[in-house]
Amino acid sequence: MTSYQEHYNQTAMPTALYFKDKRFVEKTFSKEKDFESLAFTHSKTLFGQHSIIIDAKKKIDNQALGGIIPDAFLFDLNDPNNPEFYLIEVELAKHSFYNHIFPQITKFFAFFKNLESQNELVGKIYNTVTTDANLKKEFVDKIGNQELFKFIKDTIENSQNILLILDNDKKELPEIISTYTDTWGKMVKLSLLKQYEHNGDYILSLTPEFENIDTIDIASNEQDENKTNVYTEDYHLEGVSQEIKDTYHALKQALIEKIPTLKINPQRYYISFRKKRNFAFLQIRKKKIGLVALENEEVIKQKVSGYSVSTLGESVQRFYNGECARINIDNADNIDQVINLLVEIQK
C-alpha cells in the first residue's frame, strides 16, 4: 500500500488524466463552497447509492448544537447490518491546518464525547428528517419498518466517525494522527477528492474509494509490520461495551489455545489474527465486532449460522487479497461457530 508521504510526493503537483486520447486536467478550487458542492452533488456516486447525506448548514441552525455544525451528516447504509454515521468536514488544503482545520475537527471530538450533545443531535436530525418529505422517504426506503428515532439514535451511539474530505494532501496529518491516536487516529477518516476537466466533461477521483474508508489508511503505511506500532488492543477496546470486550477476549483466548503460534496484530482500523498469513480482521465498535474472515461467503454462512454475514464489495475483497465476508458479532452466544471456522481457515 502507498504510504501517505509517498502519496503526498506523488500528488502534491497538479496532475492530468488521459482517456480515449482526451486530456483531463485537474481542477483547482479557489472557494470552499464550490468544493463542498462537488462532494454533495455527487454524494450517491462517491458514497454509494445506499448512503443518505444531510446538508447540515442548510438544515440545522448553526447555534442549535453549540455552533459546531459540520458541513454535512452522512448515514452509510450500504451494509444494512452495519450502518455508519459520519460528520463530514470539507476543506481546501490551502487552509491553515493549525489555525483552521485542527480546531474545527477538535470541536467534533468534544461533541462526540458529550452525551447531552449527542442526544441533542439525535433529536435535531430526527426532526429534520421527519419534516423533509424527501429525506423521510429515503430513510424509510432504506430501513423499512424499523423505528426511525431508534435507528438514528442507535447508529450515532455505535458509530462515531469524522470524514475529512480534502482537495489535496496536508503534510501535518501523519504526525497528528499517530500522536492523537484516541481521537484523530480512531475517529477521523481521510479522503482526497479531485475533479479533472476536458471541454465541459469531467472525471472525479476519490482516494481511498469510500467502500474502503474503514480499511485503507492513506495517512500511514499500516502494512509495514516492522514499524513501531502505536495502536494496541486496548486502543480498539476503549469505550466498548463490556459484553463486546468479553466476547473479544473469549474469542482471542480460545484461538490462542487452539493456535499456539497465533499473532495479534493491532493496526489503526482493525486488529488482524495471523499465523503464517492474516486470516481474520476485526473492526470493533461499541456494541458489535465486524470480523472479516478470509473464506468464501457461502462457506462462512454454512459454518456460522448464529450471526448475520455481510457481503463485501470487490474493492474490499481486493484489499484483503481474496474471497471474504464480514461476520457481525454482537454477543458471545454462538462464538464457538466463529472459533471453529477460524481454526479451519488458518491451516
Image: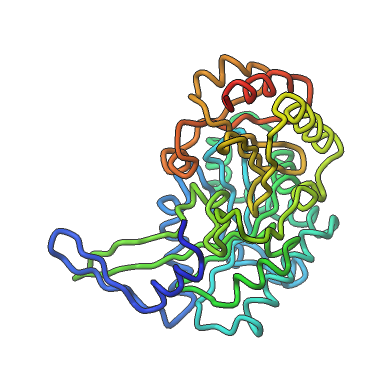
In the rendered structure, the answer to whether residue 25 lies left or right of residue 66 reads left
Residue 49 drawn above or below residue 73: above
Examine the image and state in which quarter residue 137 appears. Answer: top right
Residue 157 drawn above or below residue 331: below
- Quarter of the image with the C terminus in it: top right
Q: Position of residue 225 (x, y in %)?
A: 60, 53
Q: How is the image coloured?
A: rainbow
Residue 266 drawn above or below residue 3: above
Residue in front for this viewpoint, 284 or 87 = 284
Residue in front for this viewpoint, 121 or 162 = 162
Examine the image and state in which quarter residue 101 appears. Answer: bottom right
In the rendered structure, the answer to whether residue 74 lies left or right of residue 202 reads right
Instruction: Name the outermost residue toward the left.
Output: 21
Q: Position of residue 271 (x, y in %)?
A: 67, 44
Q: How many marks?
A: 0
Residue found 47% across the figure and 61% down from its top = 40
In the rendered structure, the answer to whether residue 32 lies left or right of residue 11 reads right
Q: Position of residue 321 (x, y in %)?
A: 45, 39
Q: Position of residue 118 (x, y in %)?
A: 78, 55
Residue found 53% across the figure and 42% down from its top = 138
Examine the image and state in which quarter residue 9 appears. Answer: bottom left
Residue found 63% across the figure and 18% down from its top = 304
In the rendered structure, the answer to whether residue 306 lies left or right of residue 242 reads left
